């Protein structure tokens, strides 16, 4: 939804139709720094991710489209509107609450084993705010399932299966003796709706790779789509730091009939914001790009018919999907919070201001070489971004932005707890141990927006420290630099992340 800015800012002046029309630069109020040029917003509330950028709110026609897309994003689909027969979420907003990361069911207990081990996972009803990817160990999909296991379904229809998760926790200590722990998820699929091949046995766990993804924050998605692709490819050519074991590379994927640079998704496996795929795979709603139900040819189609579903039309129009695309592109990015000059913090036995404390954390961020992958400054291309049905957004063009990501793939290791972050799932050129550098802008407000601090692709990290300590492979050197810091320096770096 649209919200008024809580801090006065200088109004933008531009014509809505011409890409070359310049905008008056946006000035940051005291205590803030611009994160996304003219799309920066100065809000610290639970709506920090879900606020329209000034170029949207200043132009009535832009605001109208944004509001339409916002409603379509948040409103739950009904069965008559195309939900089901199987699905993962009943609206975009069900998994991306306030355009953020809805708390995933991976940390919600659903039962207990006979030996007392807690069991987490899908649950029986509603939605789980996670995507469950399943493949054979040779990378092929299972017949009758496809790439995603849909663990939810409308009344009267059988879900494709249910996910159970059991956590293995291990204790560690920093060199100075401070303890921390890491938790690794072990997945089991139960209640498979179909048997394996021509046997009467369910799919064998020995043949299965399963990886789970929790929702991404929809922060700065428009700016990501407007990124200068040449700059990203130049970063890939330059991203070679042998002294730290770092060498990033681009992901290229075939999308919309052509080979493109991947930018969005955990493995940079998409070149767009996947609105049509979200309606299709996540909600089960057909559209012009995906005209068949995701369970086409499965028993759920007949069950859906018996529950009154009709399959003789497309469920979502291209116009509606582009309005959702518009909404996502039009979201503002929270400004960086520099900290107060009056609040006092203790650092190595002396009092300094919060602002000095955060500035020290930023210094430690650089000393740990985090910036070699979490690139602080990038630029958008002159023409901005183009929506899925061809609408151009020139307001996103020629901007200096600070996403704290190079949008490249990096090997994140397979050694920690014997598995690391390797999920054995291939996406485009990305191997199982390779992940796109996560953009950090807005990350410090996730707890306020979504009431949790679960990080990484599957939410295994319960706080910033665990997220850092899961870094292996190309992140090993930075992790070790962080690990060997004085405790107060580690704390300042975490405080810096919380300021983003």
Image (cartoon, rainbow, N blue to C red):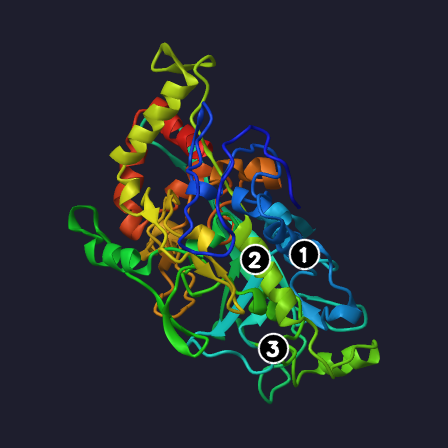
**Residue that mark 2 sits on:** 326
Q: Is residue 298 above or below residue 14?
A: below
Residue 261 percent location from the top left of the image: 36, 66
On screen, residue 374 versus residue 236, left or right, reads: right
Farthest residue to the left: give it: 243
Residue 78 percent location from the top left of the image: 77, 65
Residue 482 percent location from the top left of the image: 31, 34
Any mark on residue 68, and which?
1
Nearest the viewer among 156 and 19 is: 19
Question: Which structural element holds mark 3?
Answer: loop
Q: Quadrant of the C terminus?
A: top left
Question: Which structural element holds mark 2?
Answer: helix
Q: Which of the two labelled residues, at mark 2 and mark 1, occupies the earlier sequence position?
A: 1
On screen, residue 289 versus residue 468, left or right, reads: right
Any mark on residue 480, and which?
none
Q: Are marks 2 and 3 in contact (CB under 8 Å)?
A: no
Any mark on residue 288, and which?
3
Q: Is residue 329 above or below residue 343?
A: below
Q: Is residue 9 above or below residue 456?
A: above
Question: Which structural element holds mark 1?
Answer: helix
Nearest the viewer among 354 and 306 is: 354
Spatial distance from mark 2 to mark 1, Cα to Cα? Answer: 9 Å
Residue 449 seen in render: yes
Nearer the observer: mark 2 or 3; the answer is 2
Q: Are marks 2 and 1 in contact (CB under 8 Å)?
A: yes
Q: Which of the two labelled residues, at mark 1 and mark 3, occupies the earlier sequence position?
A: 1
Q: Residue at x 30, y 57 (%)?
A: 232
Number of labels in the image equals 3
């Amino acid at each position: 939804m649209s919200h008024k800015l809580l801090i006065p800012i200088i109004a933008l002046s531009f014509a809505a139709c011409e890409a070359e029309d310049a905008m008056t630069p946006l000035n940051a109020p005291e205590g803030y720094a611009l994160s996304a040029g003219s799309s920066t917003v100065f809000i610290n509330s639970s709506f920090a991710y879900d606020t329209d950028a000034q170029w949207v709110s200043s132009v009535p026609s832009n605001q109208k489209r944004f509001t339409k897309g916002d409603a379509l994003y948040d409103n739950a689909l009904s069965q008559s509107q195309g939900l089901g027969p199987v699905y993962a979420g009943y609206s975009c907003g069900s998994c991306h609450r306030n355009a953020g990361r809805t708390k995933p069911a991976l940390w919600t207990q659903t039962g207990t084993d006979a030996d007392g081990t807690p069991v987490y996972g899908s649950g029986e009803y509603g939605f789980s705010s996670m995507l469950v990817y399943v493949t054979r160990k040779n990378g092929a999909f299972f017949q009758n399932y496809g790439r995603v296991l849909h663990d939810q379904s409308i009344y009267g229809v059988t879900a494709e299966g249910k996910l159970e998760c059991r956590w293995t926790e291990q204790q560690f200590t920093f060199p100075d003796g401070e303890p921390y722990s890491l938790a690794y998820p072990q997945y089991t699929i139960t209640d498979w709706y179909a048997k394996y091949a021509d046997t009467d046995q369910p799919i064998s766990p020995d043949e299965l790779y399963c990886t789970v993804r929790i929702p991404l924050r929809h922060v700065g998605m428009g700016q990501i789509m407007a990124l200068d692709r040449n700059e990203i490819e130049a970063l890939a050519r330059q991203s070679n730091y042998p002294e730290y074991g770092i060498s990033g590379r681009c992901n290229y994927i075939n999308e919309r009939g052509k080979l493109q640079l991947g930018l969005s998704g955990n493995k940079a496996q998409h070149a767009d914001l996947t609105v049509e795929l979200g309606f299709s795979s996540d909600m089960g709603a057909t559209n012009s790009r995906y005209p068949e139900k995701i369970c086409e040819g499965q028993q759920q189609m007949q069950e859906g018919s018996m529950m009154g579903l009709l399959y003789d039309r497309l469920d979502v129009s291209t116009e509606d999907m582009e309005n959702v695309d518009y909404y996502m592109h039009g979201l503002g990015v929270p400004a960086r919070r520099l900290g107060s000059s009056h609040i006092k913090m203790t650092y190595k036995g002396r009092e300094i201001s919060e602002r000095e404390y955060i500035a020290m954390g930023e210094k430690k961020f650089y000393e740990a070489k985090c910036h070699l992958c979490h690139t602080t400054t990038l630029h958008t291309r002159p023409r901005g971004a183009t929506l899925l049905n061809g609408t151009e957004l020139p307001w996103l063009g020629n901007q200096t932005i600070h996403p704290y990501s190079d949008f490249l793939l990096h090997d994140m290791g397979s050694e920690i707890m014997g598995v690391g972050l390797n999920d054995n799932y291939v996406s485009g050129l990305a191997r199982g141990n390779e992940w796109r550098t996560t953009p950090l802008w807005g990350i410090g407000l996730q707890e306020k927006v979504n009431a949790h601090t679960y990080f990484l692709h599957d939410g295994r990290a319960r706080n910033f420290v665990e997220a850092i300590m899961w870094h292996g492979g190309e992140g090993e050197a930075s992790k070790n630099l962080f690990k060997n810091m004085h405790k107060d320096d580690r704390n300042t770096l975490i405080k810096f992340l919380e300021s983003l």
